Image (spheres, coloured by chain):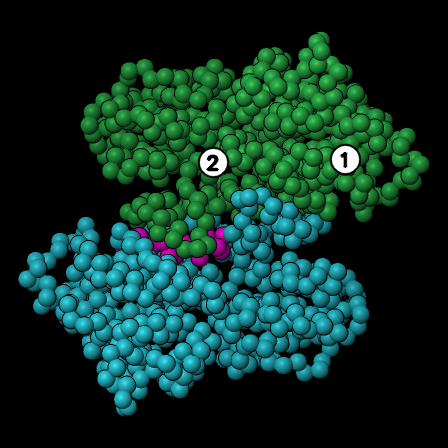
Chain colours: A green, B cyan
Amino acid sequence: MSQISIAIIGLGYVGLPLAVEFAKKYPVIGFDIKQERVNQLRKGYDATLEITGQELNSVLCDRHSSCIDKPAALFITSDSDALAEANYYIVTVPTPTDKNNRPDLTPLIKASETIGKVLKPGDIVIYESTVYPGATEEECVPILEKFSGLKYCTTQPQTQAPSPSALSTQHFFCGYSPERINPGDKEHTVTRIKKITSGSTPEAAEKIDTLYRSIITAGTHRASSIKVAEAAKVIENSQRDINIAFINELAMIFNRLGIDTHEVLEAAGTKWNFLQFKPGLVGGHCIGVDPYYLAQKAQESGYHPEIILAGRRLNDNMGKYIASEVVKLLIKRDYKVKGAAILMLGITFKENCPDIRNTRAVDIAQELKQYGAAVEIYDPWATPEEVMHEYGLESLSSLNGNHYDAIILTVAHDHFKTLDIRKLLSTPTGIVYDVKGMLPPDQVDGRL
Amino acid sequence: MSQISIAIIGLGYVGLPLAVEFAKKYPVIGFDIKQERVNQLRKGYDATLEITGQELNSVLCDRHSSCIDKPAALFITSDSDALAEANYYIVTVPTPTDKNNRPDLTPLIKASETIGKVLKPGDIVIYESTVYPGATEEECVPILEKFSGLKYCTTQPQTQAPSPSALSTQHFFCGYSPERINPGDKEHTVTRIKKITSGSTPEAAEKIDTLYRSIITAGTHRASSIKVAEAAKVIENSQRDINIAFINELAMIFNRLGIDTHEVLEAAGTKWNFLQFKPGLVGGHCIGVDPYYLAQKAQESGYHPEIILAGRRLNDNMGKYIASEVVKLLIKRDYKVKGAAILMLGITFKENCPDIRNTRAVDIAQELKQYGAAVEIYDPWATPEEVMHEYGLESLSSLNGNHYDAIILTVAHDHFKTLDIRKLLSTPTGIVYDVKGMLPPDQVDGRL
């Protein structure tokens, strides 16, 4: 085959680290529709903090200087015409849900249109975005076919493989290789996570597997079909969701029984096969979203998911539950709930990470506002403009000297460990509620 | 304190191994209400196959021979008067559910009555049976008090500790130390499983912990209260139940989507934090039962469990689901369902173990009978009389030369790996359904 040239569509938490790794070996075009993101990346700055400036700069090429002749480099652009020179297309766009928790495939469809317009015979399109089983071939392939005028080449049972002679002139191939990026995790980085690969024909599967094997030091696992690879990915986060939902359910039961959940989990954790999950909010663009993809496809097939949706319902209600617990504590201590000054420590979806996408900490803030409380949010990791844009909530990136009737620790940023939280209370009887079980029990008035 | 003398009430899967271990160090009275079990054990035969004849005989003492003076030995009896000489009572009776899946505390209450009648001041009663949080102190302690005329000594917040002088003459103590026996597991045996301990006062907790530490080489974990210890135990199996229910739900979804579940699980299992559960029936006296104990207490406290009961519902329906899948396959291949000869391989609740308590394999048999099929059961591990007694089903302990239209592998006994299963079919188009994913995929017509 001709020389490998890779285009990566979507330069977020998933696409950028992948683009940087590939760019150490191959010419890579990194494409994103957000001009601001492209501008920042071209200057060597990754706002997601996954890639350092040094690492990014070491592979960047602006195509106006000497690097144009480098065999391996990363060219970042928002110009889709530049994609035409690639022969491998890797799609790493978000797959969110809409307000009704239904899969929103718009980014995936737009990316497929963009690729379809530049697709050439023999090219391979690999999807990394989390989807339900069947999405690649049922949703994306028809768009690739429509916009390219080419035919999809597959040896899956439902279609007949074209003759070898027809192949080169009219066909393209697909693959699915799910991303397993864990934002903020510096141990499990892209090359150190075993990667599932799959392809629409045995030859495409082999090429795709070889491509990833060349950069993934943890190795690859070749799935028997695109559907199996899609299914394998979407269940990973669904499993995590269910397990946290179970622990959250325990926390609510034990709270009623006057038992400390963390003590119970510590004791149960001494059994060799107990799974050490913790109670908490479930947000972000993976765990809180992927189960809805699986549920949607299940429902389409006539199966109404019991466990998966029970987990979602439960986890999505934890913000309200926490707010109600704090309000009860305020009332118990004779605080006036209306106008009570409450500080929320943390708004990102996880600790030590600036990502605020689908954070469920906002549920606590919004519910407390419904109770009439005056909520302030402090998060040194989040960008106040982004929090305002996404959720219409004001947030502080540093404390403003105010004191509070109640403080809720919602995100376990390391930074909060250095705070003397009780000093931020307006009175010694003020309330500290610890969602994450981060503080010593004797310093808090309630915890999950 | 006086010399330790231990009575163990209930000599089943849990009590017998514990009695044998304690009897290596202390005088132990093993008590069981089943005369047949007592007779067998006295002859050195353990029908549960947890303890070998050699191991049992090495500690047995019949009190009529020289062993009466041995400082450490196991005396097995069904005479409750013999219990009076003990100062530690350990309760290891079953805690099943009734037909409505409600906790049936009868064995626990009967054991507490038996102990209450012989209880002396200063004695310690330790419960090992799985219960809901609060059961020891709310259900068992009042019975111990009533039948002994003594007072329960506790330093739990709700009661005031008695003065030291009152203690020795009127009081007894309690503890909870959950059993973690895994029937048939020769690796995780009683001394090799870390044990949670707890006691009604700090002194009782210390004595109980010391007692167990003297035989448990894996060590102990002292929980802060009896309630925490009870809660820790009941959640362990509930967590397992939920996780299997999730995988069972996936199996049903993927079956509809034409995806092989085992291939998906194999692929997902390449992620570092994916939990490797398998689809299947959930039976036995632990995983299928414990969640109902937790659910009952949650409901009493006003919380209706979403996840826990969703898991139970789903797992309890798997037998029916499997039967319907087999019937669909029969119909597809033009077999007449009415009178179809179906062989079920395995009736015990788990592999390589004779335990048939609460086995869900019976659900498959019963559902197939509803469809009019003629079901035979073959299980070299189960006792046909016991299967008949418990479930009214005939079973074979060896094959009878018959051939079948369909064969369902329900339990993964090692023995079944040596069978040429397809040779047992009446025709080559006969159906093999593999519940456990034990056989190579190309030898089966369907699997979970």
Q: Nearer the viewer, residue B34 or B201?
A: B201
User: Residue A8, image x and y in percent?
Assistant: 69, 25
Label at residue A174: 1
The magenta-colored residue range is B226-242
Residue A267 colored in magenta in the image: no
For label 1, count other residues whose C-alpha is less than 10 Å away and answer few (under 14), some (14-19) or many (20+): many
Q: CA distance from mark 1 to mark 2?
A: 32 Å
User: Residue B287, image x and y in percent?
Assistant: 46, 60
| Displayed quadrant of residue B369 | bottom right
Point out the image quarter for the C terminus of chain B: bottom right
Q: Amino acid at mark 2?
A: Val
For label 2, count other residues whose C-alpha is less than 10 Å away and answer few (under 14), some (14-19) or many (20+): many
Q: Dominant secondary structure of the magenta stretch?
A: helix
Point out the image quarter for the N terminus of chain B: bottom left
Residue A159 shown left or right of residue A275 in the figure: right
Q: Is residue A347 visible?
A: yes
Q: Residue at x 35, y 74 (%)?
A: B20
User: Residue B316, image x and y in percent?
Assistant: 53, 60
- Sequence-earlier tag: 1 or 2: 1
Q: Determine whether the residue tagged by mark 1 lies in a helix, strand or loop.
A: strand
| Displayed quadrant of residue B352 | bottom right
Label at residue A282: 2
Q: Residue at x 53, y 67 (%)?
A: B350
Residue A330 shown left or right of residue B421 in the figure: left
Dot 2: chain letter = A
Q: State whether residue B354 is above or below residue A72.
A: below
